[in-house]
Every structure is written in C-alpha cells, then in structure tokens.
Image: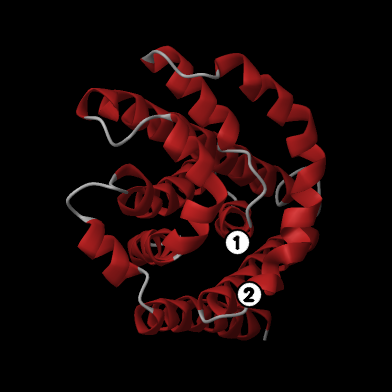
Amino acid sequence: MNEPAYGMFFLFGLFGGTHCLGMCGGIVGALGMGAAPRFSLHLAYNLGRLGAYAFAGLAAGALGAALGAGGMAAAAQAQTRLALMLFANLMLLAAGLYLMGLPRILAFAEKQGQYLWRRIQPASRHFLPVRHVGQALSLGFLWGWLPCGLVYGALSSALGSASPVSGALVMLAFGLGTLPNLLLAGFILARFRAAAQARWLRRLAGALIFAYGAYGIYRLWRMAG
C-alpha cells in the first residue's frame, strides 16, 4: 500500500459525507453540537469512532497477513495474496460506483454487518444521554461498528494490504475524511460541507476511487501473467 492510496481513502471518506450524516445524524444531535461547551463531547465521540476504525483496520490487516503466510507453500501464499488484493479492488470499484450514485451496490456488505451490530448496539444505551467525555468516547467506539458500506469498502483494502500497520492507516485515512462532515456539522464550515456533498464532486471522487480499483486489478493481471 503506497502513500497516495491513503489520500484516496481520505477522499473516499470526505465525499461520502452525506451517507455519514444519515447514518450518524441521531448521535450528532444527541451530543448537543450546537452549543460550544458540548464540542468536547463531539470531538471525543469522533475520536472513539476513529479508534474503532483503526482497530478494525489493524485486525483486518493482520488477518490478511495471516491468510497469506500461514503454513502454506509459497505458490499458495502468492495465490492467497492475489485473491485478497482482487477482493479489495473489486470492493473499491463498488465504492466508486456508490459515490457516483449507486448507493445500493454496497447494501450486501451492510446486511452482513447487521449480525455483529445486533450484539454491539444494546451496549450503546449505557452511554446515553451523554454527559461527559468518557461516555462520548465509549459511544463513538461502539458506533464505529455500525454497518456501513463505505466503511466496508475501505476495510476490504485494509484486508488486502496484508499488514496490520497499513490496514490501520487505511482506516484512519478514511475516518479522517469523514470528520469535516460530522465534526463540523452545524458550525461555520457548513458551506464547505455543502460543497463536499455537491453531486459533481461526489461523482468525480467516485470516478477516482473506481479508477484506482480498476488500476489495481490491472496490476494484479500483470502480476498473475
């Protein structure tokens, strides 16, 4: 995973902002973001959410590394790595199409995530209403596991990286891209938020993500050849 890829995942999170606000808008409202003293709670919530993303990316990268190196012959390891990278790039193609206006293309991934979320979601009730930073941080970490096709698109690349560090960095880059829409919602950068959600910008970002996935598949084809 090279450095430019992290910037691509930042754009992925940034221009998926409309979806993020729809998924997490309820929590944003519960944190009372409109009042200045409550900004610390909102910041803590987002730090918890980014912590969940980084942890998931680290685990996915470690799993990818284990699948590609665990007690197999060299040829089998190489084939496993190629399969992981192919899956990751196919998910990026789907993510690009999502940003270009096909939101249902990642619905299958969200449906699978519902099984885990049903076990995690009840625990979030213990931190509501949010009164202090510790509750907001814990709530953010739990809500980081909310089923989301955008998250799964990035997480597949964390898996394909076959590296815990690269996996965590991929998810951190994606999470940082979501911050302008969630952390600054309702504040003075509302105009920037509206611009980031403009249809032509979302389609441009989607085309870049799609092109990056397509180029990844082309590289895999060359490697396999």
Helix, strand or loop at label 2? It is helix
- Horizontal side of 62 relative to 4 (left or right) equals right
Q: Residue at x 51, y 20 (%)?
A: 138
Q: Residue at x 42, y 45 (%)?
A: 172
Q: Position of residue 113 (x, y in %)?
A: 75, 47
Residue that badge 1 annotates: 153
Mark 2, Cα crowd under 10 Å, few <14 / some 14-19 / many 20+, is: many
| Closest to the observer, 61 or 35 | 35
Label 2 is placed on what type of residue? Ala
Label drawn at residue 217: none
Mark 1, Cα crowd under 10 Å, few <14 / some 14-19 / many 20+, is: many
Q: Residue at x 69, y 72 (%)?
A: 104
Q: Is residue 8 visible?
A: yes
| Closest to the observer, 218 or 31 | 31
Q: Is residue 86 visible?
A: no
Q: Residue at x 47, y 41 (%)?
A: 165
Quarter of the image with the C terminus in it: bottom right
Residue that badge 2 annotates: 94
Mark closest to the chain's N terminus, 2 or 1: 2
Most distant residue in the left direction: 188
Q: CA distance from mark 2 to mark 1?
A: 8 Å
Label 1 is placed on what type of residue? Gly
Q: Position of residue 221 (x, y in %)?
A: 64, 84
Dot 2 and dot 1 residues touching (CB under 8 Å): yes
Can you say whether 34 is above or below 69 in the image? Answer: above
Identify the coloring: secondary structure
Q: Quadrant of residue 116?
A: top right
